[in-house]
């Protein structure tokens, strides 16, 4: 104690801190694998340019995900540490029904553990690919929770998203899963299709969480 109550009060934590996040950052190989056009430069150059851009945009948290692959994480992790940007490692899976799911883990999760987690979903190939996991959407959610990670239903309103792949009771059950913590949508909620917006706003009784 400094016997100065005002100074002590000023030095206390100031409550919530809002951070700008990018929770689906792709490694250097992503563009060549899925868009037919590679990034210029080697993985280190790509990582440096990407994190420089993140710093300029005041992004302080990123998550790195590739389809069924974690090989691009180490170089991005190294560059993020230099810039004091928090990095959540992970991967993107496609459930047995065809739903894309982002799976994220603690920043201190090492590479071997990430590879083991992928293996638990039946992913054995060492390179990036968009093959199906052996697990259903809700099974992936439950397994990632057991792995002490979290899941996001990727681009939920698009062709490989939760709302397009499932319907009826299957979609209701998936939506109401206690393990589904977040979804990814392409813009403000007011721009969602009329059938989806009441669900996301928790105003549809059938889907109420």
Image (tube, grey):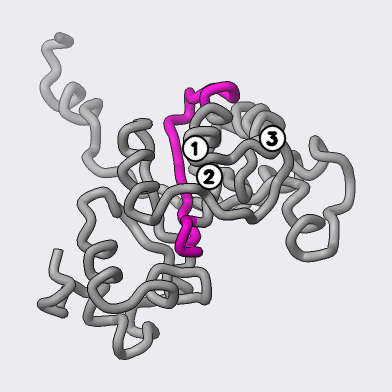
Q: Which circle's residue, 3 or 2, is located before the other in the chain?
A: 2
Q: For numbered disc 1, what is the local secondary structure?
A: strand
Position of residue 32 relative to residue 74, above or below, is below
Mark 3 vs mark 2: give the one in front.
3
Residue 163, image x and y in percent?
Answer: 38, 74
Instruction: Describe residue 46's horizontal placement relative to residue 4 as left or right.
Output: right
Q: CA distance from mark 3 to mark 2?
A: 16 Å
Residue 87 seen in render: no
Residue 89 colored in magenta in the image: no
Q: For numbered disc 2, what is the local secondary structure?
A: strand
Q: Which circle's residue, 3 or 1, is located before the other in the chain?
A: 3
The residue located at (58%, 40%) in the rendering is: 123
Corner quadrant of residue 47: top right
Residue 59, image x and y in percent?
Answer: 53, 49
The residue located at (48%, 23%) in the rendering is: 108
For the residues labelled 2 and 1, say whether their Cβ atoms are less than 8 Å apart: yes
Residue indicated by mark 2: 62
Q: Mark 3 Cα within 10 Å, few/some/many (few <14, many 20+)?
A: some
Q: CA distance from mark 2 to mark 1?
A: 6 Å
For the residues labelled 3 and 1, say whether their Cβ atoms are less than 8 Å apart: no
Mark 2 vs mark 1: give the one in front.
1
Instruction: Describe residue 56's horizontal placement relative to residue 187 as left or right.
Output: right
The residue located at (54%, 36%) in the rendering is: 118
Residues shaded magenta: 95-113
Residue indicated by mark 1: 88
- Tell me, for residue 71, which label it has, or none: 3
């Amino acid at each position: 104690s400094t016997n100065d109550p005002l100074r002590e009060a000023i030095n206390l934590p100031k409550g919530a801190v809002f951070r700008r996040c990018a929770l689906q950052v792709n490694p250097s190989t992503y563009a060549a694998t899925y868009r037919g056009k590679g990034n210029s430069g080697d993985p280190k150059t790509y990582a440096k340019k990407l994190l420089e851009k993140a710093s300029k945009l005041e992004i302080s948290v990123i998550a790195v995900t590739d389809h069924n692959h974690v090989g691009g994480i180490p170089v991005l992790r190294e560059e993020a540490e230099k810039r004091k940007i928090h990095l959540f490692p992970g991967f993107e899976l496609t459930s047995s029904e065809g739903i894309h799911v982002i799976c994220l883990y603690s920043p201190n999760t090492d590479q071997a553990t990430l590879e083991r987690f992928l293996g638990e979903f039946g992913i054995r190939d060492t390179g990036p690919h968009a093959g199906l996991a052996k697990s259903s959407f809700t099974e992936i959610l439950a397994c990632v929770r057991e792995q002490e990670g979290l899941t996001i239903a990727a681009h939920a309103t698009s062709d490989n998203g939760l709302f397009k792949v499932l319907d009826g009771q299957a979609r209701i059950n998936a939506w109401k899963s206690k393990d589904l913590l977040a979804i990814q949508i392409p813009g403000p909620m007011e721009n969602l299709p009329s059938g989806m917006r009441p669900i996301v706003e928790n105003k549809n009784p059938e889907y109420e969480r």
